[in-house]
Image (cartoon, rainbow, N blue to C red):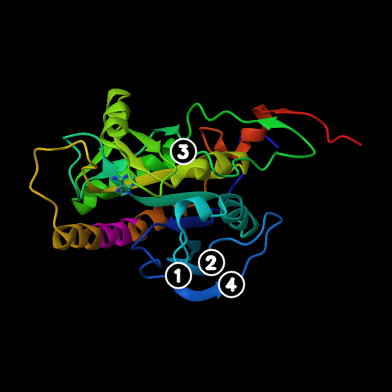
Amino acid sequence: STNATQSVSPVIGVIGGSGLYDIAGLENKEWRKVETPWGAPSDELLFGTLDGVRCVFLPRHGRGHPLPPSRLNYRANVAAMKIAGVTDIISLSAVGSLREDLPPGHFVIVDQFIDRSFAREKSFFDTGCVAHVSVADPVCPRIGDVAQAKLAELGVPHTRGGTYLVMEGPQFSTRAESELYRSWGCAVIGMTNMPEAKLAREAEICYATVAMVTDYDCWHDGHDSVTVDAVVKVMHDNADHARALVKAMIPELGKARGLCPAGCDRALEHALITAPSH
Ligand code: ADE
């Protein structure tokens, strides 16, 4: 119910992209299988505590047996987080850059998405009842504030705000597509954060994306030809920064708080919902 004095003991969920397979400093670790009505998530979930804060980690593509973006069960991944009691999700993702001022190694605290994915289940409300949640503001600004503060403290180059174009993949974009997305004002491009963000909103879980730039996609012709060594080094540095970021964010996000000021945790109160049919 909506009660301004309601107190929340946060449980922090972390969805790790390629290169991030655990939470640094996590204690009382236990990998546990979580079943959902939507099937199996990408992997077992890693439960633990950090500074006394309950945490749950999910490797988005699974450990060892990487699943491509189109094969992920996004509903099971988000449902498993909900079943595990997660209140706040930090989503980390490798992305390509669509802007000159966002070079490899740069982190972007995304505030908008354009969802061009198509071969994925995108809603928990596909049978029985109908809900239309608002995703006008698809990320939780409270989590973004914490990410921004901690990236500044860590000295990681970052930008607050930017639109993440979600493509289906698995192939990268054509040059024409890349230029189209640039003309739309997009900042970064990736393959996984939708429908993840929409589903988190339907599940009333606060959610924010920290996008880690690995490359300039194909539009950028002014840079040195990419070498595998350079890309591997960027991904390695990004993963180190991501681990430090998550470790710093968890104690802050884990503090007892009231309901989310942005209302992410009450998204269904404002959705149109039809009663289940009999
Ligand atoms: N992930 C990392 N780099 C990418 C790119 N250029 N396009 C789509 N997804 C990406």
Residue density around tag 1, few if under 14, some if 14–19, many if 20 or more, within 10 Å = some
Are the residues flagged by discs 4 and 3 in contact, CB closer than 8 Å?
A: no
Residue density around tag 4, few if under 14, some if 14–19, many if 20 or more, within 10 Å = few
Q: Would you say the magenta stretch is mainly helix, strand or loop? A: helix
Residue holding disc 3: 140
Looking at the rendering, the stretch of residues picked out in magenta corresponds to: 238-245
Cα distance in 3D space between marks 1 and 2: 7 Å
Taking the spot 50% from the left edge, 26% from the top edge, the residue there is: 136
Residue holding disc 2: 43
Residue density around tag 2, few if under 14, some if 14–19, many if 20 or more, within 10 Å = many
Residue nearest the observer in this picture, 274 or 227: 227
Q: Which mark is residue 138?
A: none
Of mark 4 and mark 1, the one earlier in the sequence is: 4
Q: Amino acid at mark 3?
A: Cys
Cα distance in 3D space between marks 3 and 2: 25 Å
Are the residues flagged by discs 4 and 1 in contact, CB closer than 8 Å?
A: no
Residue at the right extreme of this rendering: 278
Q: Is residue 253 above or below residue 187?
A: below
Mark nearest the camera among 3 and 1 is 1
Q: Which mark is residue 63?
A: 1
Q: Position of residue 106 (x, y in %)?
A: 21, 46
Q: Quadrant location of residue 50?
A: bottom left
Q: Is residue 171 left or right of residue 225?
A: right
Q: Amino acid at mark 2?
A: Asp
Tell whether position 31 is magenta.
no
Residue holding disc 4: 32
Mark nearest the camera among 3 and 2 is 2
Mark nearest the camera among 4 and 3 is 4
Q: Position of residue 260 (x, y in %)?
A: 53, 38
Q: Position of residue 137 (x, y in %)?
A: 47, 29
Q: Is residue 187 left or right of residue 40?
A: left
Quarter that holds the C terminus: top right
